[in-house]
Amino acid sequence: MLTGAFGNGKNSSLLSEYASLLGDAVLRNRARVAEHSAQIEADLANKVKSEFVANMSHELRTPLNTVIGFSKILSEYDKHQIDDRQVIEYADLIHGAAEQLLSVINGILDISKIQSGRFDLQAHDLSVEELLRECVDDFDAQASMASVKLDLQVEADLPAIYGDQRKLKQAFGQLLDNAIKFTSDAGDVGLSACLADDGTVAISVRDAGVGMTAEEVRIALSVFGQVDGGRTRWREGVGLGLPVAKALFDLHDGRIEIRSAKATGTVVTVNLPTADYIHSAGLIMDAGHKPDVQTVSETL
């Protein structure tokens, strides 16, 4: 019995040693896996950073080169034989490049504020019809220049929505801007609002433009995403407007759905909660919510 007791003790010691070795092996393996995952994440972050810097470099240098080049020519007016028509043309090019540059800077600042949680919303009850009518008024001149007809249809007695009027105008303005740019001459762009079955207010922007595939929609919703829709490059913008618009809708607890097909057109529908729902649910819209400006809506 004494020998058996010692035998059991030896076995227990061996089992404890094996368990300790096995535990160490598991911990080392977990450490290697964690280290590998961290390296992958670091490599991905560096790649994203490099792509961002490359895009920023291109989008900033292009308009800056235009401003510097043509302003240099104008400053040396006495050395170059340029007529008044050319002076006006160069001034227009400088103005357009400066606006493009400002658009890039504003887009970057908006995305940075949204992602950092410092994007303040001055929210209050809003009339949907008044909001959309102001949007149409803002883009009426642009539509006329493009020979595009703007049509506004708002369902009667729509409930108010709750949000920041200026930011919502910015977001819907981006949708209208895209619709007008990609609609051919003598085409129509429709802006409509109605009460959806789920109790939200559904606001849609419809165009009869070139349309997009599902993959092109994903590209358009990504930061600096560019889609060749059969139009000249300058019509496409810098790829910041639509991601910022989606992020703004996210901040208002809204959701965006984009339905599009080649040569058919695009319909962008935004569902926003009513003011009564926001108040009854005790929801507060602030900068604490950080929407992902890179992610495509799950409704696609």
Image: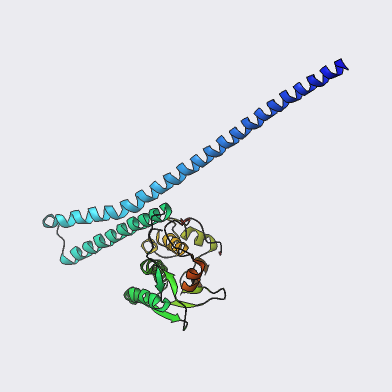
Please name whichever residue, 111 or 177, is drawn nearer the observer in this view of the structure: 111
Indicate the colouring scheme: rainbow
Q: Where is residue 25 in the image (x, y as percent from the top left)?
A: 66, 29
Please indicate whether residue 210 sits to the left or right of residue 62 in the image.
Answer: right
Q: Is residue 18 above or below residue 60?
A: above
Q: Is residue 220 above or below residue 186?
A: above
Label total for image = 0
* Quarter placement of the C terminus: bottom right
Please name whichever residue, 19 or 152, is drawn nearer the observer in this view of the structure: 19
Q: Which residue lies furthest to the left in this view?
A: 78
Q: Where is residue 218 in the image (x, y as percent from the top left)?
A: 51, 59
Q: Where is residue 128 in the image (x, y as percent from the top left)?
A: 42, 76
The quadrant holding residue 33 is top right
Q: Residue furthest bottom?
A: 156
Q: Which residue lies furthest to the top in this view?
A: 3
Please indicate whether residue 152 sits to the left or right of residue 76 in the image.
Answer: right
Please indicate whether residue 36 sits to the left or right of residue 275 in the image.
Answer: right
Residue 188 appears anywhere in the view: no
Q: Which residue lies furthest to the right in this view?
A: 1
Please name whichever residue, 2 or 144, is drawn nearer the observer in this view of the structure: 2
Give the residue at x 39% y 50%. 55
The quadrant holding residue 239 is bottom left
* Quarter placement of the N terminus: top right
Residue 125 appears anywhere in the view: yes
Give the residue at x 37% y 76%. 136
Please name whichever residue, 146 or 253, is drawn nearer the observer in this view of the structure: 253
The quadrant holding residue 223 is bottom left
Give the residue at x 63% y 31%. 27
Q: Where is residue 112 in the image (x, y as percent from the top left)?
A: 39, 53
Give the residue at x 79% y 20%. 9
